[in-house]
Image (cartoon, coloured by chain):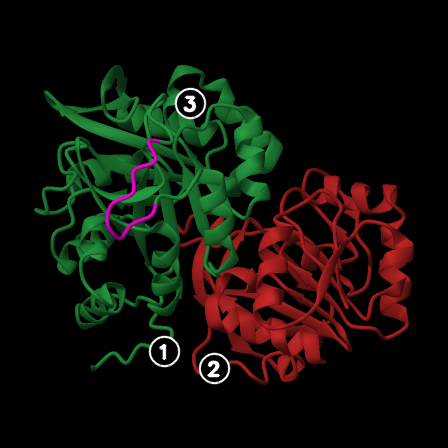
């Protein structure tokens, strides 16, 4: 069973619909005990970093997620859920994250007159850390992004994929079975569904 | 590279898909739920559903020979979201934070707000603050005036006196994540977008602008991108022919626009 963390942030229905489509059983989970009982965890998220980390702590989910990851069990963060894996974020001040993948979350500064947020479909260049995640991706995969901040891992080896928006932007991170994607796989058609199917089987 | 988006816009009236001309003629063309499965297979980049049912007109229960009306827009949204794996925007008749919450909870990624924002601009601030800018698309129905455009309320029927570019800039300040820009004059005409209108709003804002209204040929979509739009939307042209979005994308590729092909053979 895949637990979808429900902490009041984000469109959980879409993630659920997409997991249904790839044949993966899932349930919304909002307490540490149910999270511990799951085989895999998806941490979705839309909104602002400080609210999100506060909501996770309030429900005891921040510690539960750290324990889950420390046991080597599969965890996938999506969008803000990926940024929460970082050590810290500068969105609306300076805030600690879950610290599962060292690095910080910073405002996008694409230059070239490019607009922020970065909204729309963009390409992915797979890095070695993403070999497993994207093993089943098609040729020239594209994914749907909508974000104003980007995760900058301290160790470049943690970057699993990059996209180009006025320069390289972290599109995916991975450390063992802790995965994070900045894009929305549940809204990225066949390429996104392939990634979710991969996660459900990893 | 960020791919220019191609977006079919589906109009709902009393639970059925309709086509529109000058915001007035509404001809019933199909069932909204069947259509999403087709578009999913056609590599669309995003879907926009707009409910244009006027208040007091709901549930007319019209059943044509082959087309069965669905019950409510929220039921339609439930069904559509189940098989829609691209971003889904839902709009029309949204007046309260609760209206927004209901639509997002049922699987919409974004909502469009038009009349309620014109009447009470603070509502936009409230929606963006509650759900984030990524969920708020401000829809503007523009009508040409002497030397400019004004924003129209209530489905293009009520003039507001607000200059479109000025209103778009205010919508951005209030937290809109994107602007959905429709031309009342070009709606259903098929002779192309009002490109001066698109340029004026692109210049007045820094958020993505989705152009809509007037597409009669696929090459018109390309003109929106040249005018600075991030996305080109159209309704009628995508309704009446099979595999229309695939054909549109092949034509755009041939014109040198890097649209997302997602498995479509560019040469076919």
Chain coloured green: B
Mark drawn on residue A138: 2
Kindly indicate whether the residues beneath marks 1 and 3 are on one polypeptide chain.
yes
Determine whether label 1 and label 2 are within 8 Å by CB.
yes
Residue A104 place in picture, x, y as percent? 72, 56
Residue B254 sits in quarter: bottom left
Q: Which chain carries label 3?
A: B
Residue B217 sits in quarter: bottom left
Which colour denotes chain A?
red
Compared with B200, A69 (above or below) is below
In front: B93, or B138? B93
**Region in magenta:** B60-68
Dot 2 crowding, Cα within 10 Å, few <14, some 14–19, many 20+: few
Q: How far apart are marks 1 and 3 (CA)?
A: 39 Å
Dot 3 crowding, Cα within 10 Å, few <14, some 14–19, many 20+: many
Judged from the image, the secondary structure of the residue bearing numbered disc 1 is: loop
Query: Is residue A190 magenta-colored?
Result: no
Q: Which of marks 1 and 3 is nearer the N terminus?
A: 3
Query: Is residue B63 magenta-colored?
Result: yes
Residue B148 place in picture, x, y as percent? 16, 25
In front: B235, or A97? B235
Kindly indicate whether the residues beneath marks 1 and 2 are on one polypeptide chain.
no
Query: Residue drawn at (33%, 59%), measured in percent from left and top?
Result: B4
Q: Is the magenta stretch mostly helix, strand or loop?
A: loop
A70 left or right of B226 in image: right
Q: In what quadrant of the picture does the N terminus of chain A appear?
A: bottom right
Q: Which residue is denoted by mark 1 in the rendering?
A: B263
Mark drawn on residue B117: 3
Q: Mark 2 lies on which chain?
A: A
Kindly indicate whether the residues beneath marks 3 and 2 are on one polypeptide chain.
no
B198 left or right of A99 in image: left
């Amino acid at each position: 069973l895949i637990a979808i963390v429900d902490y009041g942030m984000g469109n959980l229905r879409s993630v659920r619909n997409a997991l249904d489509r790839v044949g993966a059983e899932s349930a919304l989970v909002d307490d540490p005990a149910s999270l511990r009982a799951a085989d895999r965890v998806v941490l979705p998220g839309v909104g602002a970093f400080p609210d999100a980390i506060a909501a996770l702590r309030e429900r005891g989910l921040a510690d539960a997620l750290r324990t889950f990851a420390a046991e080597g069990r599969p965890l996938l963060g999506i969008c803000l859920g990926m940024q929460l894996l970082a050590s810290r974020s500068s969105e609306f001040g300076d805030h600690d994250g879950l610290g599962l993948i060292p690095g910080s979350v910073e405002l996008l500064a694409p230059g070239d007159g490019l607009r922020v947020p970065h909204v729309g479909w963009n390409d992915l260049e797979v890095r070695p850390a993403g070999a497993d995640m994207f093993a089943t991706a098609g040729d020239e995969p594209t994914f749907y992004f909508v974000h104003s901040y980007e995760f900058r891992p301290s160790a470049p080896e943690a970057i699993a994929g990059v996209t180009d928006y006025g320069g390289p932007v972290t599109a995916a991170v991975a450390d063992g079975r802790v995965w994070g994607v900045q894009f929305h796989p549940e809204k990225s058609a066949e390429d996104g569904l392939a990634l979710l199917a991969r996660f459900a089987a990893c | 590279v960020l791919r220019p988006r191609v977006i079919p816009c589906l109009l709902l009236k009393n639970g059925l898909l309709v086509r529109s001309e000058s915001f007035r003629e509404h001809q019933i063309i199909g069932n909204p739920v069947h259509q999403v499965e087709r578009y999913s297979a056609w590599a669309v980049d995003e879907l926009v559903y707009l409910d244009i049912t006027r208040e007091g007109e709901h549930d007319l229960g019209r059943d044509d020979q082959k087309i069965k009306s669905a019950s409510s827009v929220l039921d339609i949204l439930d069904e559509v979201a189940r098989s829609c794996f691209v971003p889904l925007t839902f709009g029309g008749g949204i007046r309260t934070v609760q209206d927004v919450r209901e639509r997002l909870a049922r699987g919409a990624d974004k909502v469009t707000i038009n009349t309620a924002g014109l009447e009470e601009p603070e509502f936009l601030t409230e929606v963006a603050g509650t759900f984030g800018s990524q969920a708020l698309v401000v829809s503007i129905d523009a009508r040409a005036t002497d030397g400019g455009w004004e924003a129209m309320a209530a489905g293009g029927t009520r003039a507001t006196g607000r200059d479109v570019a000025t209103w778009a800039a205010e919508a951005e300040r209030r937290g809109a994540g994107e602007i959905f820009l429709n031309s009342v004059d070009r709606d259903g005409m098929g002779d192309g977008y009002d490109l001066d209108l698109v340029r004026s709003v692109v210049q007045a804002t820094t958020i993505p602008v989705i152009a809509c209204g007037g597409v009669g040929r696929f090459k018109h979509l390309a003109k929106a991108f040249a005018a600075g739009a991030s996305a080109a939307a159209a309704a009628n042209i995508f309704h009446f022919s099979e595999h229309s979005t695939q054909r549109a994308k092949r034509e755009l590729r041939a014109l040198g626009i890097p649209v997302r092909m997602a498995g479509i053979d560019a040469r076919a």
